[in-house]
Image (cartoon, rainbow, N blue to C red):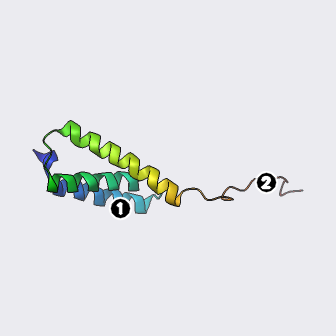
Amino acid sequence: MLWQAWWLWLAFGVVLLLVEIAAPGFVALGLAVGAFVVGLLLLVVGVESLVWLLLIWAVASLIAWVVIRKLAGERKGQVKIWDTDINE
């Protein structure tokens, strides 16, 4: 089946990396890491079911997104709260 092609999942990961470059926000990066995990899993093991592949992709993407947000997430002091009006 087409969804069992390991190279297709790796290509999908590359496309998601390009989306992340165009619109940074760490969301597409987590999805890309999940696609790479599924592609490598298919290359090594070979999974038969589309449902399992999508489940593995979702779980791997979520774990990658959480790790990326913890490592490079919001920094302290990133949000500035203004107390005075600029026009005063």
Q: Mark 2: which secondary structure?
A: loop
Nearest to the observer: residue 46 or residue 54: 46
* Residue occupying image coordinates x 19% and y 39%: 50
Q: Please state if 81 lies on the left or on the right of 11 as rendered.
A: right
Give the farthest residue toward the right.
88
Q: Is residue 87 visible?
A: yes
Residue 15 in percent (x, y) is at 30, 58
Nearest to the observer: residue 25 or residue 35: 35
Local crowd size for mark 1, using a 10 Å CA cut-off: few (<14), some (14–19), many (≥20): some
- The C terminus, quarter of image: bottom right
* Residue occupying image coordinates x 35% and y 60%: 17
* Residue 18, numbered label: 1
Q: Mark 1: which secondary structure?
A: helix
Hey, what amino acid is under mark 1? Leu
Local crowd size for mark 2, using a 10 Å CA cut-off: few (<14), some (14–19), many (≥20): few
Residue 64 against residue 18 in the figure, above or below: above
Marks 2 and 1 sit apart, C-alpha to C-alpha, by 36 Å
| Marker count (numbered) | 2
* Residue occupying image coordinates x 33% and y 56%: 33
Q: Which sits earlier in the primary sequence, circle 2 or circle 1?
A: 1
Give the farthest residue toward the front.
45
Q: Which residue is mark 2?
A: 82
